[in-house]
């Protein structure tokens, strides 16, 4: 999937913001944005040597120049390794936030190729389960350590997909609106909000020329030394200039670009007061540009002012701006520049076409934090064949059991839950204090968009940070008070989870959060859909368990109900098939088959049982691997009751993160061995 946006409502103005917010445009790679603008904006257009676009309307004096940025923080491919990973270099000279690298770590990204067709990827991360096996815990938080995984198995395969040096890499972006007050959120959205303002002004001028000349300028390379801004100021002889800044303070404000020459800023402030629009008088905002001094950019600084839109969480992937507030600022600039008329309503983007989905894709799209697996269980029940649905029941713990026979001789089990957060307290300002459910690294989730799940519905929300190593954070779903949050249905015990989607990579590789353990659930569902009960010759239970991530609690409950002779837990084989990990342990490779998890943190499988399953797989032409990894599995809870525990899995890179990567061939191999084992005499 590409970048996405979801709207709770649409106001007439700023109609372009959702689309602009998700287009890819790293510094010096703003092409998709410029293409969109040139088709949309009208006017007399000029594209300069920095990639900045200017559009002029009207004629005569005064000549007003309004400037907004286009680009976003990103990286460029600086090398492709022999095994197909991309190495990167910063495209921004000054980071918009001190934790900028953390915001990319373990996240889905997009590679902008020369052909114009983007390639999906992820930024590799250390697997949580292998952390205890490392002699030293390292932080992969600098471009020098970054490896971007696009699913390629070699440098040649990456290049055949069109990936090359100099391609730009940006975050996969989602646009959301929080609550009902028009708070718009996307990665570094403040830069794109200024461009959306200018598009609204352009539509007004298409209907009626301005009083004088107005040039709207969309500056490239704002995060790379403001080179586009410097060029625009040099080539456009305007009488007055307003620069709409990215980032900044939470409240909108105006600042001069020189403390001792504040004329333009004072003029805007006076106009704002007349309109009863509250603007802060910000401190002078000098611009640092390599090879240029600020006074060389602004030839007449007394004619220049900078306008801050007001942005929450500035410099992060969850910047928030107020659409109604920005509309008021657009009206202010319209009056200032002699632009008549009101915003022109425009149609929204067409919905994405429906796509075919596999069982795995259907289950991945459902959220089910540990202890709140109901939506996943319901999705599984809908996917079961009629005979299996009739043979199913939900036990007192919430596990879903499909029983073929009363007392099982063998039992297959996969877990329905995923990592997430549980609401602990609704705070006075409407935000919700949440604590982690299950293992995970906080940096992989903080400052990213997600869903707050109430009893009635899921609400768009963002997770604010709790600090390095913290297991808690604050979820913002758009409420301005505790009473408003309660009115939206929020209460302690609700859950929060990070957004996710199924994203194809190169070849048969794919990325999504919660492959652990939706792959196992999908394998059981597909096995049941391919079988009739008479083909299952021994008494067998198929179990979809709860609360695995918080201590195997669902499996423990089932172990009190049944004592099978064999148990086959289906769960991740956390693999060291990554340039960040030590191959001493967990060396199963993606694309080489399912994995028999012969030993892990919760136990050791008898070697004879490992060899029996491996031989059975080979006999049926199913690719198989076996090895040792870390982490516990549901089957370990049945060993005390006499069961032989034979964990089955698939190799997974970057476990417990939004960057999880699998090979679909391995997933299919897992499903095939489940069908073979389920029909063994």
Image (spheres, rainbow, N blue to C red):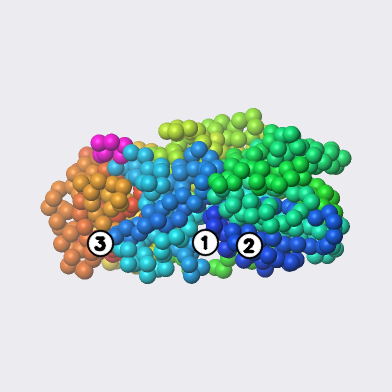
Q: Quadrant of residue 311?
A: top right
In the rendered structure, find residue 2 and report the number of the disc placed on it: 1
- C-alpha span from label 3 to label 2: 50 Å
Q: What percent of the width, then of the height, locates residue 266?
A: 80, 38
Q: Secondary structure at mark 1?
A: loop
| Within-10-Å neighbours for mark 2: few <14, some 14–19, many 20+ | some
| Within-10-Å neighbours for mark 1: few <14, some 14–19, many 20+ | some
Comparing 510 with 453, the one in front is 510
Camera sees residue 231 = yes
- Name which of mark 1 and mark 2 comes first in the sequence: 1
Q: Which residues are magenta?
A: 131-137
The single residue placed furthest to the left in the displayed view is 608
Q: Secondary structure at mark 2?
A: loop
Query: Which residue is denoted by mark 3 in the rendering?
Result: 592
Residue at position x 41%, y 43% in the image? 142
Q: Magenta includes 534?
A: no
- C-alpha span from label 3 to label 1: 28 Å
**Residue 460 placement, left or right of 667:** right
In the rendered structure, find residue 48 and report the number of the disc placed on it: 2
**Residue 356 placement, left or right of 330:** left
**Residue 413 placement, left or right of 477:** left
The vertical placement of 649 against 620, above or below, is above
Question: Foreground mark, 1 or 2?
Answer: 2
Q: What percent of the width, then of the height, locates residue 232?
A: 67, 55
The vertical placement of 382 against 310, above or below, is below
Comparing 170 with 382, the one in front is 170
- Name which of mark 3 and mark 1 comes first in the sequence: 1
In the rendered structure, find residue 55 and report the number of the disc placed on it: none
């Amino acid at each position: 999937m590409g970048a996405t946006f979801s709207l709770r409502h649409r106001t007439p103005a700023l109609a372009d913001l959702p689309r602009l917010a998700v287009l890819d445009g790293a510094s010096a790679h703003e092409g998709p944005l410029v293409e969109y603008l040139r088709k949309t904006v009208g006017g007399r257009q000029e594209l300069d040597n920095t990639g900045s676009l200017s559009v002029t309307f009207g004629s005569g004096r005064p000549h007003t120049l309004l400037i907004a940025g286009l680009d976003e923080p990103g990286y460029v491919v600086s090398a492709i390794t022999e095994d197909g990973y991309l190495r990167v270099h910063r495209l921004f000279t000054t980071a918009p936030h001190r934790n900028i690298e953390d915001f990319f770590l373990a996240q889905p990204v997009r590679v902008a190729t020369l052909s114009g067709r983007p390639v999906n990827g992820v930024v590799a991360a250390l697997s949580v389960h292998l952390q205890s096996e490392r002699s030293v815990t390292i932080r992969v938080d600098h471009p020098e350590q970054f490896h971007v995984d696009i699913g390629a198995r070699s440098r040649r395969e990456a290049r055949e997909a069109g990936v090359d040096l100099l391609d730009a890499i940006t975050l996969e972006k989602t646009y959301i609106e929080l609550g009902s007050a028009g708070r718009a959120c996307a990665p570094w959205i403040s830069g794109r909000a200024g461009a959306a303002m200018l598009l609204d002004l352009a539509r007004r001028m298409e209907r009626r020329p301005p009083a004088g000349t107005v040039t709207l300028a969309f500056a490239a390379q704002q995060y790379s030394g403001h080179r586009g801004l410097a060029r625009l100021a040099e080539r456009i002889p305007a009488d007055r200039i307003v620069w709409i800044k990215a980032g900044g303070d939470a409240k909108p404000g105006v600042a001069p670009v020189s403390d001792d020459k504040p004329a333009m800023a004072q003029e805007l402030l006076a106009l704002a007061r007349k309109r009863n629009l509250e603007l802060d008088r910000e401190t002078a905002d000098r611009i640092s540009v390599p090879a240029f001094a600020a006074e060389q950019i602004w030839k007449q600084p007394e004619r220049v002012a900078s306008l801050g839109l007001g942005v929450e969480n500035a410099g992060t992937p969850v910047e928030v701006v107020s659409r109604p507030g920005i509309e008021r600022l657009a009206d202010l600039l319209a009056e200032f520049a002699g632009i008549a008329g009101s915003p022109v309503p425009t149609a929204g983007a067409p919905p994405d076409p429906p796509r075919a989905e596999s069982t795995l894709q259907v289950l991945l799209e459902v959220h089910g934090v540990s202890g709140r697996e109901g939506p996943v269980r319901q999705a599984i029940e809908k996917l079961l064949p009629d005979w299996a649905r009739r043979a199913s029941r939900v036990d007192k713990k919430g596990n879903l059991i499909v029983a073929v026979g009363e007392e099982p001789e063998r039992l297959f089990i996969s877990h329905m839950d995923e990592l997430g957060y549980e609401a602990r307290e609704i705070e006075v300002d409407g935000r919700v204090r949440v604590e982690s459910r299950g293992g995970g690294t906080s940096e992989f989730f903080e400052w990213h968009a997600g869903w707050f799940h109430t009893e009635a519905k899921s609400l768009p929300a963002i997770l604010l940070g709790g600090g390095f190593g913290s297991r808690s954070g604050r979820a913002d779903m758009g409420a301005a008070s505790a009473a408003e949050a309660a009115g939206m249905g929020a209460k302690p015990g609700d859950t929060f989870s990070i957004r996710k989607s199924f994203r194809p990579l190169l070849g048969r590789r794919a990325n999504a959060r919660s492959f652990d353990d939706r792959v196992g659930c999908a394998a059981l569902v597909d096995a049941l859909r391919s079988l009739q009960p008479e083909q299952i010759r021994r008494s067998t239970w198929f179990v979809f368990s709860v609360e695995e991530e918080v201590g195997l609690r669902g499996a423990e409950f089932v172990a009190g109900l049944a004592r099978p002779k064999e148990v086959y837990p289906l769960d991740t084989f956390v693999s060291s098939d990554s340039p960040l990990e030590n191959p001493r342990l967990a060396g199963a490779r993606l694309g080489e088959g399912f994995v028999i998890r012969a030993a892990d943190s919760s136990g050791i499988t008898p070697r004879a049982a490992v060899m029996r399953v491996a031989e059975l797989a080979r006999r049926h032409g199913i690719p198989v691997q076996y090895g040792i990894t870390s982490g516990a599995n549901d089957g370990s809870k049945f060993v005390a009751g006499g069961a032989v525990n034979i964990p089955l899995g698939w190799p997974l890179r970057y476990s417990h993160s939004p960057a999880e990567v699998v090979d679909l061939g391995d997933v299919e191999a897992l499903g095939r061995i489940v069908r073979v084992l389920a029909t063994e005499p």
